[in-house]
Amino acid sequence: MARIETPKRIRGTQDIFGDEQRRFARVLEAFETVRRLYAFRRLEIPVFEATEVFSRSLGETTDVVSKEMYTFEDKSQRSITLRPEFTAGIARAYLTEGWQQYAPLKLVTTGPVFRYEAPQAGRYRQFHQLDAEVIGAAEPAADVELLVFADQLLRELGIQDGVTLQLNTLGDAETRDAWRAALITYFGQHRADLSAESQDRLERNPLRILDSKDPRDRPIADAAPDIDAFMTSEAGAFFESVTKGLDAAGVAWTRNARLVRGLDYYRHTAFEFVTDRLGAQGTVLAGGRYDGLIGALGGNETPGVGWAAGVERLAMLIDEPAAERIDAVIVPMGEAAEARATGILADLRRAGIATDMAFKGNMKRRLAKADAQGARFAIIIGDDELAKGAAAVKILGAGTQSEVPFGDLARILSA
């Protein structure tokens, strides 16, 4: 009979277990802690959406839409896409579920997202994000709220040192249009010296040339006109309010005038938290204000601002959390003891005592398992204990042992 070959894990995916899982869980735990402190509400949205949700929000010409999305036809011949990010799906839900009545909304979600790109350190084709959004608030205070939230998350994880908040403004629509026109003129004068990719972007998305990593583009991009020369007084005042809010909250920031977002619906604040501890892929959290997004999806013009962070990247930066510990391990010796231990195990767990059972091996091996799990107590039950109606409870750290009636175990172990 031919040997059946075991299926392989698909490239760009991951199985998370052990130390990696503890890091992963710690990031989610910290996010949940800070979410509650900032009174953000959780929501869950579908893993897949109609493709137009992303093509209309992210733009047909972006790399994500044109190269990286997992898109397929379902059995009804509808074009479906696995979510490459959260914001578009949240904006769609805001419109289709009638959540306008609750605005302004402070929302968070977490979960897997999917992009078909070259796997590299901290980046997978199925990866996981934290996402925070404020929808329906046009005030700069919403931007400050999200940025302080992000800063506190990094502090909760103990990774704030070496992470820098880079901040920029994209201005209002008038500012952005004037700046975009000036960039097209400027880059057009240097077209022949630009990389092929930037020549293509000049027609589709000229702002993206500013953050090109190609050495041919950098001298040209560095000398390009700054947005400040085209800033309206209103846009300038908005950005000043954001920076003053950050200063008041004690959040350090640095201006990066080359930090951009290519899509037209982005306005005002753009930001990234970056580190040099992850090599070239140094962004750990990024976001901005997207006042034109919900209008692009067919709704009324609605302000919005948000950010996303990769769970895997954050997990790479934190110290390894301690392994989970349990309160007790039951060590039954013999079939009769196992039968009695099953009831005791259920009772202890219902009393809120984290308990496991060691079924296999001799006494020494079972006690070694209890110790390896970090248990405080080993509850030993054999024929003698069954006859007495009392377990031998061993305190593993101290090595001391005492008899405890079966009915008193939950009370004694909880003390």
Image (cartoon, helix red, strand yellow):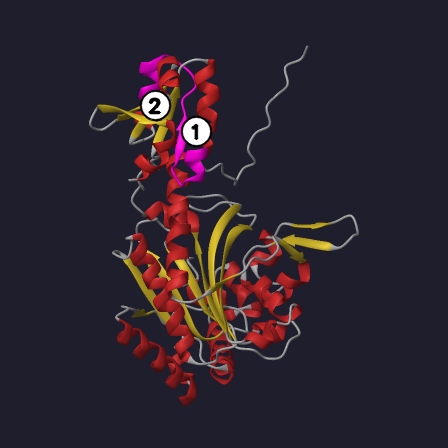
Which element carries disc 2, helix, strand or loop? Answer: strand
Mark 2–mark 1 CB contact (< 8 Å): yes
Given the image, on which type of amino acid does mark 1 rest? Ile
Q: Residue furthest right?
A: 76
Which element carries disc 1, helix, strand or loop? Answer: helix
Q: Is residue 412 above or below residue 104?
A: above
Q: Position of residue 221 (x, y in %)?
A: 40, 68
Instruction: Write the residue at 39% across / 78% down.
Output: 141
The quadrant in which residue 215 appears is bottom left
Locate residue 310 relative to residue 394 in the image: left or right. Answer: right
Locate residue 230 relative to residue 277 in the image: left or right. Answer: right
Q: Residue furthest bottom?
A: 233
Q: Position of residue 203 (x, y in %)?
A: 57, 69
Q: Is residue 127 visible?
A: yes
Figure quadrant of the N terminus: top right
Query: Which span is picked out in magenta?
Result: 347-369
Number of callouts: 2
Question: Which residue is label 1 attached to?
Answer: 344
Residue 372: say if magenta: no
Which numbered disc, 2 or 1, marks the residue that appears first in the sequence?
1
Label 1: few (<14), some (14–19) or many (≥20) C-alpha neighbours in 10 Å? some
